[in-house]
Amino acid sequence: MNIILTNLTVEEIARAIIREMDSYFAAKMEESRRDAFGGIDLAMEITGLAKPTIYGLVSKRKIPHSKRGKKLYFSKQDLNQWINDGERGQKTENKALEPETLVEGLVQIMIDPSPRMSIL
């Protein structure tokens, strides 16, 4: 039994999905460029820790950071990852349910449908 979902061809659907993905990822890239790095204030904001605590973690090399001369730099992404990695009782992530993974799988199915699955 075949189910018709749309009058669009597989190629048209794939192009529309790719267009949307390009737009989505371009916005994400722009977002990540803004305020991606900062100083001690960024580290305090993201971690919620006091300045002396952060300096202590830096001196023990227990928090991700970079140093140029006397200036400390922190990456927003690295700090968030550091926090997530340190959570107790971490939740297991199901990568298969993330939007990007679902879209990639859908595009792959539309481009190369398996014999047991019918798009149209």
Image (cartoon, rainbow, N blue to C red):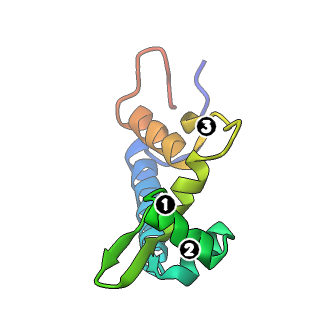
From what the image shows, is residue 80 above or below residue 111? below
Q: Residue at the spot x=58%, y=24% of the render?
A: 2
Location of residue 68 in the rendering, given as x and y in whole percent from the top left corner: 29, 80
Q: Amino acid at mark 1?
A: Ile
Q: Which residue is mark 1?
A: 63
Could you say which quadrant of the image residue 89 lies in?
top right
What residue sits right under mark 3 in the picture?
93
Mark 2, secondary structure of its residue: helix
Q: Residues within 10 Å of mark 3 (few under 14, many from 20)?
A: few
Residue at 61 percent of width and 69 percent of height: 53
Residue 74 seen from this side? yes
Q: Position of residue 41 (x, y in %)?
A: 57, 83
Along the polypeptide, which appears first: circle 3 or circle 2?
Answer: 2
Q: Is residue 24 visible?
A: no
Whole-angstrom CA distance, mark 3 to mark 1, is 23 Å
**Nearer-N-terminus badge (1/2):** 2
Q: Secondary structure at mark 3?
A: loop
- Marks 3/2: CA–CA distance: 25 Å
Residue 82, position as x, y percentages in the image: 53, 54
